[in-house]
Amino acid sequence: MISILYVDDDADIREIADIALSLDPDLDVRLCASGEDAVALAATWRPALIMLDFMMPGMDGPATLHALRAQAETRNIPIVFITARSSDRDIATLLALGAEGVLAKPFDPMTLAAEARQFL
């Protein structure tokens, strides 16, 4: 099984992502509603990939990425941002922060699992 952590503060988007990623029987998906929860879960579960919302209250996506990179347990986990902020400038900024990639919202539920796999 390939473990994927999906982080988004919007419950509806988390549910759609969970269903979309679960279409791939080889993916084991867990969900978090906040950056703080994601940092804690990733340190113990150590997913193969983290899919991270950019705009969240409290700890936003970039702050979450920074916190994950600061922990030895999560430092090398690939992180892909899922965001509506997908201009060339936004993408360049996120890649410069250390993201493996950026996927635009709204995403296509039928292709999300395949898109996730390209970052593994």
Image (tube, rainbow, N blue to C red):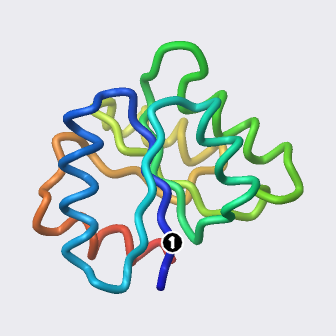
Residue 25 drawn at (x, y percent): 28, 84
Q: Residue at x 25, y 52 (%)?
A: 17
Q: Is residue 35 left or right of residue 26?
A: right
Say above or below: 53 vs 43: above
Residue 69 drawn at (x, y percent): 78, 47
Q: Is residue 94 left or right of residue 71?
A: left
Instruction: State which quadrant residue 85 falls in.
Output: top left
Q: Nearer the viewer, residue 38 or 65?
A: 38
- The residue wearing badge 1 is 3
Instruction: State which quadrant residue 56 falls in.
Output: top left
Q: Rate crowding at label 1 as few (under 14), some (14 to 19) or many (20 or more) other CA atoms within 10 Å.
A: some
| Secondary structure of the residue carrying numbered label 1 | strand
Q: Which residue is farthest right?
A: 72
Say above or below: 97 vs 61: below
Residue 76 drawn at (x, y percent): 75, 64
Q: How many marks?
A: 1
Q: Nearer the viewer, residue 68 or 87?
A: 68
Q: Residue at x 58, y 32 (%)?
A: 35
Residue 49 drawn at (x, y percent): 54, 65
Q: Residue at x 68, y 41 (%)?
A: 39
Q: Which residue is farthest top?
A: 58
Q: Is residue 116 left or right of residue 59?
A: left
Instruction: State which quadrant residue 110 falls in.
Output: bottom left
Q: Nearer the viewer, residue 89 or 66?
A: 66
Say above or below: 79 vs 88: below
> Identity of the amino acid at label 1?
Ser
Q: Nearer the viewer, residue 100 or 69?
A: 69
